[in-house]
Image (cartoon, rainbow, N blue to C red):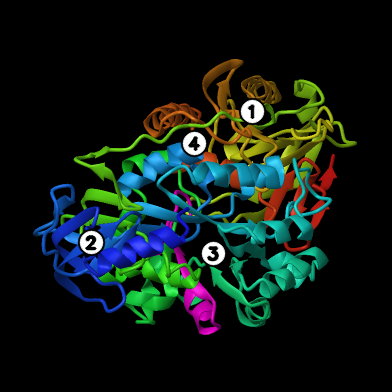
Amino acid sequence: MVLRDLGSIINVLNAALGKEPPDLVIEGGNIVNVYTGEVYRSDVLIKGSYIAKVGKFKGGPSGVKVINASGKFVVPGFIDGHIHIESSLLSIPRFAEAVLPHGTTSVVTDLHEIGIVLGLRGIRFMLDIARKTPLKVFLMVPSHIPFMPGLETVGSEFGVKEIEEALGWDESVALSEVVAAQLLGLHEELLKSIELTFRMRKLVEGHGPALTGGVLQAFATAGIASDHESVSCEEGLEKLRLGIELMVREGSVATNLSEVIKVVTQRHVDVSKVMLVSDDVSCIDLVTLGHMDYKVRRAVEEGVDPVKAIQMVTINTAKHFRIDDVVGSIAPGRIADLVIVNNLRDLTIDTVVASGEVVFSGGRLTTSIPEPEYPEEFLKTIRVKRRVLPEDFKVRIPVRDGIARVRVIGVRDGTLLKDALVDELKVVNGEVVPDVAKDVLKVAVIERHKATGNVGIGFVKGFGIKEGALGTTIAHDHHNITVIAVNDEDAALATNTLIDLSGGIAVVRNGEVLSKIKLPIAGLLSHEPPHKVKEEMKAIYSSIRDLGCKLRDPIIHLSFITATAIPAYGISDKGLIDVMERKVVDIVVEYRD
C-alpha cells in the first residue's frame, strides 16, 4: 500500500512543473485513457511512486530511465475487485508473484478464509505482509464469522467490535459479502455491522445468488453496492436497474462471463457500472491462463470493445471502491501502476510497472518478493480430538436391511450453486451406504479448530468418483477437514493424512495415498512458488481423474459444497444445513424395510 506523504506530494509537484527530473519515463506509447475512452500517443513521466505528468518528455539528465513504448499501448494496472486470494492456495507474496506478470497491480479481497482460522490478528498479519510487496491489497472487511452462528465451528469469531476496528484500517474499503439469507432473516449482528459501515462511510458489498423480484428489492434496501453472484444476463440486468453495480465473475468454477456480459453486448447498458472479477481462481489457472488479462481477453472474445473491457478492470473498479484517487487510471497524482501491452485484443504483456518500479519485463519478474517468517500459531492450526476411524463415517438407522430416502447435495460443473436432491440408498446391516452407480457418495466434515470431535455426515452427487476418497482442509466457510469417499476406510486415511500434513489436500485409493499437497499456513496456503504449486496441483487433479471424476475443478467444488452461504445445502461439523432455512436438517428423510 502506498499512501501520500508531504515529501512525495512536493516531489511529484516539482516534477510536474519541470523543477525536478522524473525518475522513469514511458516514452511514445499509445495511452489508453479510461476516463474518455480515447487512445492517443503520449509520454508518461513518473516521480517516485506517482505519475507526475502525461505529456511530452523534453529530456532530462542521464540518470532518468526511459522505456521506449513506441508502437505499443500503455494501460492502467489491472484491479481485481473481488477475489479470495486463498483459493489460489498461494501465500500473499507468492500470489503477487503469480499475478504481477499478468498486469494485476491491485486486488480487493476480504481475507475471510484467513479470518475464519486465525481471526483479526491473522488478517492484519497478511495485510502487513502485502505492504511489503508491489501488489496493492485493499480489504473488504468480513461481514461476520461464522456465516451461520451455532451451525458451524470456526477457529475465530468476528463480530461488530472486530469489524469496527478493521474498517478503520487504511486498506479497508467495504464490508464484504453481506449474505442474502442472513440479511433477509434480520440477523441482528449483521444489521449492526451494516449500520456501522454506513456510519464509517464505507461500502456494503453483496452476496445475493438467485435473487429476483421482491426479495431482490428487499436485499437492495440495505444499500448493497455490488454483487458478484449473477449467472445470467437477466439476473445481472435486474440488479443493475436497482442500483447494484455488477461484478461479472469468471473464476475457475463459476465461469459466468459469457452469459452475464450480454448485459453489455446485447442490452447495451452503461459499462461504467460493470466490472470483471475472479471471486475464486486456482493456481493452475493463474499460471496457465492468466489473471485479469485473461478476463479482458474473454470479454473481447464475447464482443466487448477492448477499451471498454479495460475500463471494467481499471477505472470502473477504482471508482466503485472510491480508490480512483490513487489507482485505476493513467493521470497525474495517481500511483504509477502501468502495463505496456503489444496490442489491445490479445493483451500480450511486455512490461509491468507497480508504484513506479518495473516489476516485470522481458518475460520475467524483475523484483524479489520475500516470504516472511510466520508465527507458530499460523502453522499449527489442525487441532483434532483424535485420529479418526472408519466407524466415525457410518450413517446408522434403526433398520437392518432396506431402503432409505436421503437428502443429497447436488453439484454441477460451471456453478457453485448446489441442488437440493433426494435419492434412495440401500441400508445394509443398519448402515446407509453410498451408491457409486448413482454417483451418490458420502461427504464428511471433521472439526479441526477446537478439538471438539464433531463429525458431520451427508451425501453428495456430481463428483463421479468410482473409488477412493478426496480430502481437504479448505472448506468454505468454516475450513474444517472435508472428505468425500466411496468407502469409510479411505475416508479415514484421507482425513488422517491431512492431520499429518498440518493442512492440505490428499487423494487416496484402496489404502494408498496417491497424491498430496501440504498447505501449512492456516491449513489453506503454501509458501512455495506458483509454478511448483501448479505442478503439485496437477498431480492432485490427475489422481482425482483416475478416481473417475470429470469436474473441471473438483477441489474448488469440494471446498464449496460445505458453504453455508450458497444455496441450497451446505454441510458443517454440525451436519447438513438448509441454507435458506438456516438450520440443520436430517440427512435421512424416511426409511423402510
Element at badge 4? Answer: loop
Q: CA distance from mark 4 to mark 1?
A: 31 Å
| Viewer-nearest residue: 279 or 340 | 340
Packing grade of label 3 (10 A; few <14, some 14-19, many >=20) is many
Packing grade of label 1 (10 A; few <14, some 14-19, many >=20) is some
Residue 279 located left or right of residue 143: left
Residue 223: x %, y % from top left: 63, 77
Q: What amino acid type is highlighted by mark number 4?
A: Cys
Element at badge 3? Answer: loop
Specify which label sits upstream in the sequence, 3 or 1: 3
Packing grade of label 4 (10 A; few <14, some 14-19, many >=20) is some
Q: Which residue is mark 4?
A: 549
Q: Residue furthest top?
A: 512
Asked if residue 328 lies in the magenta stretch, the reply is no
Residue under the image location 60 percent in, 77 percent down: 212
| Viewer-nearest residue: 181 or 430 | 181
Asked if residue 250 lies in the magenta stretch, the reply is yes
Q: What amino acid type is highlighted by mark number 1?
A: Leu
Residue 232 located left or right of residue 214: left
Residue interval drawn in magenta: 236-257
Whether the residues at callouts 4 and 1 have beta carbons within 8 Å, the answer is: no
Specify which label sits upstream in the sequence, 1 or 2: 2
Q: Is residue 357 visible?
A: yes
Closer to viewer: mark 3 or mark 1? 1
Q: What amino acid type is highlighted by mark number 2?
A: Leu
| Viewer-nearest residue: 199 or 310 | 199
Q: Which mark is residue 113?
A: none
Whether the residues at callouts 3 and 2 have beta carbons within 8 Å, the answer is: no
Q: Which residue is mark 1?
A: 379
